[in-house]
Amino acid sequence: MPVPAHLRDPAAIYALSFRTIREEGAPALARLAPDAQDLAIRIAHACGMVDAIDDLVVSPGAVAAGRAALQRGAPILVDAEMVAHGVIRARLPAGNRVVCRLNDSGVSEHARQVATTRSAAQVDLWDADLDGAVVAIGNAPTALFRLLERLDEGAPHPAVILGFPVGFVGAAESKAELAANPRGLPFATLTGRRGGSAVAAAAVNALAAGLEGAPA
């Protein structure tokens, strides 16, 4: 069966996808600040679930803080290579570095010594880049928990935390801690188990370019 023309045209696919999200998610979108709606639409598109918008929590000023940080050239710190690969480099406003230290030398040994995951252990190597950074966590709850611990220990403050770890163990809890006590930092998160690398990357892409490249 031939693929219909409108399903081969990237612009048409984007237009129909985002129109569908706006229509089906209208009540949930209406409760969000106007500048957070592109973020919500990107997240729903990334996971194919319009009802994910119901679980989205965006602190006041989070989108503006993230966009300003990217415009300043702030690095993007991520917990997984999949998040890094999902960031659309061409849309980054200042050629921003995307930093994942998961596979850096010594991370595995450090994780073994402190009895944690590599995702959490790499967070201990973020300090040099953390001040004013955009942090996007889409895989490991342990990474988000460790980031919050490091902030409590006096680590530099990022500009915004995009906390979207996924899973059945610790994901809901780590995001609940972020939302309940954000340490005075702007944040965005999905409550519950849902999240993932694609969602975290979509959040970065929304801060970088809104829905640019995806016609309404």
Image (cartoon, helix red, strand yellow):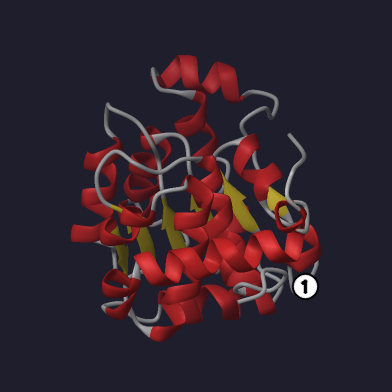
Outermost residue toward the bottom in this view: 34
Indicate the position of residue 183 as horizontal and vertical percent values: 29, 64
| Quarter of the rendering containing residue 97 | bottom right
| Quarter of the rendering containing residue 89 | bottom right
Work out whether residue 124 can be spotted. Answer: no
Q: Nearer the viewer, residue 206 or 128?
A: 206
Residue at x-position 61% and y-position 72%: 211
Residue at x-position 31% and y-position 55%: 51
Q: Which residue is mark 1?
A: 94
Work out whether residue 22 can be spotted. Answer: yes
| Quarter of the rendering containing residue 12 | bottom right
Outermost residue toward the left in this view: 180
Q: Is residue 110 above or below residue 140?
A: above
Indicate the position of residue 138 as horizontal and vertical percent values: 48, 43
The number of numbered badges drawn on the structure is 1
Q: Could you tell me which quadrant the N terminus lies in?
A: top right
Amino acid type at circle 1 is Ala
Residue at x-position 68% and y-position 78%: 72
Residue at x-position 22% and y-position 40%: 173
Q: Is residue 133 above or below residue 128?
A: below
Q: Nearer the viewer, residue 59 or 185?
A: 59
